[in-house]
Image (spheres, helix red, strand yellow):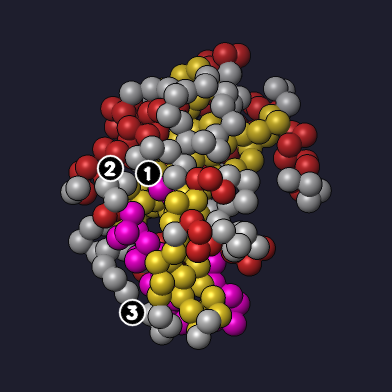
Amino acid sequence: MNQSDILQTALEQSARDYGCAPGDFLQPDPKTVLSRQNEGARVYLPLPLACSLVSYGNNVVAQTSEDLLEPVLAFLRRFPPEHCFETPNLYVLNNLLASHDQTICFMAEYFLPRLERLRPLSCPYPIRLLGRSDFADLYLPQWSNALCDKRPERDVMAVGAYDGETLVGLAGASADCETMYQIGIDVLPAYRRRGIASALTSRLALEILALGKVPFYCAAWSNLRSVHNALRSGFSPAWVETTARARSFVDSLNAGEG
């Protein structure tokens, strides 16, 4: 697998997520498509969506409900691609969504490995490769980024750093779709800033590639610790997404009910 293969795999997965063609993300002009259930989409996407934007840097492709197809396309044509994901222009989209009882919810940056930079990194503690039976009892709050208790059947492998017999860091791989595994990472607070996160992330990425799958990493762009870890681990930004959800759903998250 080379760097071109990795990008093409991501484009093909985004095409399954959005119900369009991989080449649509490389065009100069924006595009909207009707959101629907798409076979092979990432398992956690609650399709269909009222509005979700994705950009690989060239343009913006949006999947929307039928009544938002033309209004969202007009918004995308109004601003450069990068400005569609930031304020003040994002307020324009949010105001548009308000009349449909929707509001901007999730905003994230996604990272892919750079093969010329991805390599095993040193760790101050021994690293163990873990299978499903090894982490079956680790669905605990301190490992909630590495493992997903909502979809435990998707967690396929993990690597842990151990201080003696104490697990101090854990990176997990979730098979969120057929060709790409997402990496999540947790390190106990007392053990942070020692290179554990990057050592585990890079090691797990190499293990995923060895399986013939593409590892990917997601972070909110305001989560600088997570972004720095992605960069140190040999990843680089590949695409960004912004998704709207029903106002009631967002209100529940803000009330601590999500």
* Lower sequence index among marks 2 and 1: 2
Between 45 and 250, the one nearer to me in the picture: 45
- Residue that mark 2 sits on: 7
Q: Residues within 10 Å of mark 3 (few under 14, many from 20)?
A: some
Is residue 218 visible to us here? Answer: no
Give, as a single range, the part of the protein colored magenta.
Answer: 181-208
Taking 211 as reference, is 243 left or right? right
Amino acid bearing label 2: Leu
* Lower sequence index among marks 3 and 2: 2
> Of tags 2 and 1, which is closer to the observer?
1
> What is the CA distance from the residue labelled 2 to the residue labelled 1?
11 Å
**56 part of magenta stretch:** no
Is residue 8 visible to us here? Answer: yes
> What is the CA distance from the residue labelled 3 to the residue labelled 2?
27 Å
Q: Position of residue 94 (x, y in %)?
A: 64, 33
- Residue that mark 1 sits on: 180
- Residue that mark 3 sits on: 122
Q: Which residue lies furthest to the front in this view?
A: 133
Taking 126 as reference, is 150 left or right? right
